Image (tube, rainbow, N blue to C red):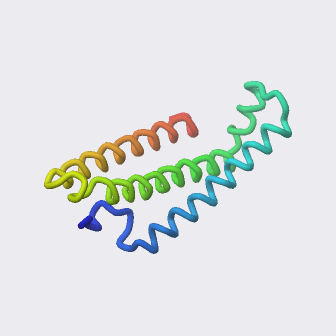
Amino acid sequence: MVTNITNLSRSGLYDWMVQRVTAVVLAAYTVFMVAWLVCNGPVDYEAWQGLFGQTWMRIFSLLALISLGAHAWVGMWTISGDYLNERALGKKALVFRFLFQALCGIVMFSYMVWGVQILWGL
């Protein structure tokens, strides 16, 4: 049995909602970026800097980055619960699942910090 301690929330319904809301944010960001790239033709450094130099775009990008992290965490937590279980791995399942989730958490946190540094120039 998988405990709620490593879960994003206390409820499967809440995790389902996180997946759906973050997917909508990521889809909106993707559609915007594709449309902007298509409308602006060949993009040079100045155009790219002009777009990402605006506060609203930095906030939108940060929202997309946070959404990506939350979406990935719920997905990877679900995968670890489904495939790193006692039936598949025996008594070592808890250790493997913990290590997998810890690695995912460290990677996602690192990408979040890196993304904030890139977006805000910190």
Q: Position of residue 97 (x, y in %)?
A: 26, 52
Residue farthest toward the left in the current orientation of the protein: 91
In the picture shown, does residue 41 fall above or below 1? above
Q: Could you say which is closer to the camera, residue 92 or residue 20?
A: 92
Kindly identify the residue that appears in the image at 51 percent across and 41 percent down. Answer: 116
Q: How many numbered discs sit on the rendered protein? A: 0
Kindly identify the residue that appears in the image at 82 percent across and 38 percent down. Answer: 38
Q: Could you say which is closer to the camera, residue 1 or residue 109?
A: 1
Kindly identify the residue that appears in the image at 56 percent across and 39 percent down. Answer: 120
Q: Position of residue 29 (x, y in %)?
A: 67, 50
Q: Would residue 41 appear left or right of 100 to someone viewing this image?
A: right
Q: Could you say which is closer to the camera, residue 60 or residue 68?
A: 68
Q: Would residue 99 appear left or right of 15 to someone viewing this image?
A: left
To which quarter of the image does residue 9 belong? Answer: bottom left
**Quadrant location of the N terminus in the rendered image:** bottom left
Q: Would residue 5 appear left or right of 16 to someone viewing this image?
A: left
Q: Would residue 31 appear left or right of 75 to someone viewing this image?
A: right
To which quarter of the image does residue 22 belong? Answer: bottom right
Q: Position of residue 27 (x, y in %)?
A: 66, 54
Kindly identify the residue that appears in the image at 58 percent across and 64 percent down. Answer: 21
Residue farthest toward the top in the current orientation of the protein: 44
Q: Position of residue 30 (x, y in %)?
A: 68, 47
In the picture shown, does residue 44 fall above or below 24? above
To which quarter of the image does residue 11 belong? Answer: bottom left
